Amino acid sequence: MPSLALALAVGLRPSVAYTPGVEAVTWNSDEALQRVLESQEGSEYWRSRWLFDQAWTRLQELENLGPNWDSYGAAAPNDAARNTAERILALLSDLAVSPTRVVASSEGGVGICFVHGDRYADIECFNTGEIVAARYRGTGEPHVWQIAPEQDAMIAAIEQIRAHFSA
């Protein structure tokens, strides 16, 4: 859900009555995203803000998942996985690398995904504390590597992902 300032900046209006000082406003997410992505004024800035708003919201929502959330026996993301994902999202924000989505991993944990054209990358923060990244292009072989839980290793992985999308 976009922040009120973001939504109003791209010309959206709330679908229910707005009360000043209250952020409990419903937005048509598909319409909002489309307007943000098509915006001519500062589009990359607003697109990035939108994606990070979505990422943080989704990460918070993952706390409410229960066991077997996917009906195939997947464990819900635990505190360790969510905390690691939170650290990585903060670094992504600092480094201006916008994730496309944040999802629960069917292997137990949190996936932070990046998609642009035929390029894909993700960082998975598992319930075990392990962190793994992957990147590939089209039907090519994926490059998968483990990330140490230290900040420098996380930054290096983010920079590899940035380079993957810049190439």
Image: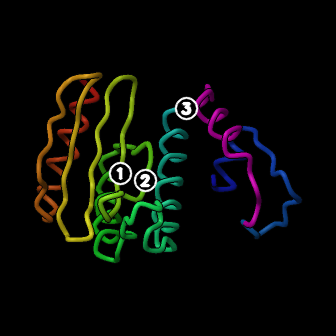
Q: Is residue 25 rendered magenta in the image? A: yes
User: What separation in Å lies between label 1 and label 3 (alpha carbons)?
Assistant: 22 Å
In the rendered structure, the answer to whether residue 42 lies left or right of residue 18 reads left
Q: Residue at x 28, y 75 (%)?
A: 80
Residue closest to the eye, 69 or 79: 69
Which of discs 1 and 3 lies nearer the camera? The answer is 1
- Expressed as whole percent of the image width and height from the top left, the position of residue 53 reads 53, 54
Q: Earlier in the sequence, mark 3 or mark 2?
A: 3
Q: Tell me, yes or no, whether the two marked residues, 3 and 2, touch with CB atoms within 8 Å.
A: no
Q: Residue furthest front?
A: 72
Q: Which mark is residue 94?
A: none
Q: Which residue is mark 1?
A: 112
Q: Is residue 41 rendered magenta in the image? A: yes
Kindly identify the amino acid type of the residue bearing the numbered disc 3: Ser
User: What separation in Å lies between label 1 and label 2 (alpha carbons)?
Assistant: 5 Å
Callout count: 3
Q: Residue at x 47, y 65 (%)?
A: 69
Q: Which residue is mark 3?
A: 43
Q: Quadrant of the C terminus?
A: top left
Q: How packed is label 1: few (under 14 Cα within 10 Å), some, or many (20 or more)?
A: many
Callout 2: SS: strand
Which of discs 3 and 2 lies nearer the camera? The answer is 2
Magenta residues, as a range? Answer: 24-42
Kindly identify the amino acid type of the residue bearing the numbered disc 1: Ile
Q: Quadrant of the N terminus?
A: bottom right
Callout 3: SS: helix
Q: Earlier in the sequence, mark 1 or mark 2?
A: 2
Q: Which mark is residue 102?
A: 2
User: What separation in Å lies between label 3 and label 2 (alpha carbons)?
Assistant: 21 Å
- Expressed as whole percent of the image width and height from the top left, the position of residue 108 reads 32, 65
Decide: is 19 above or below 89: below
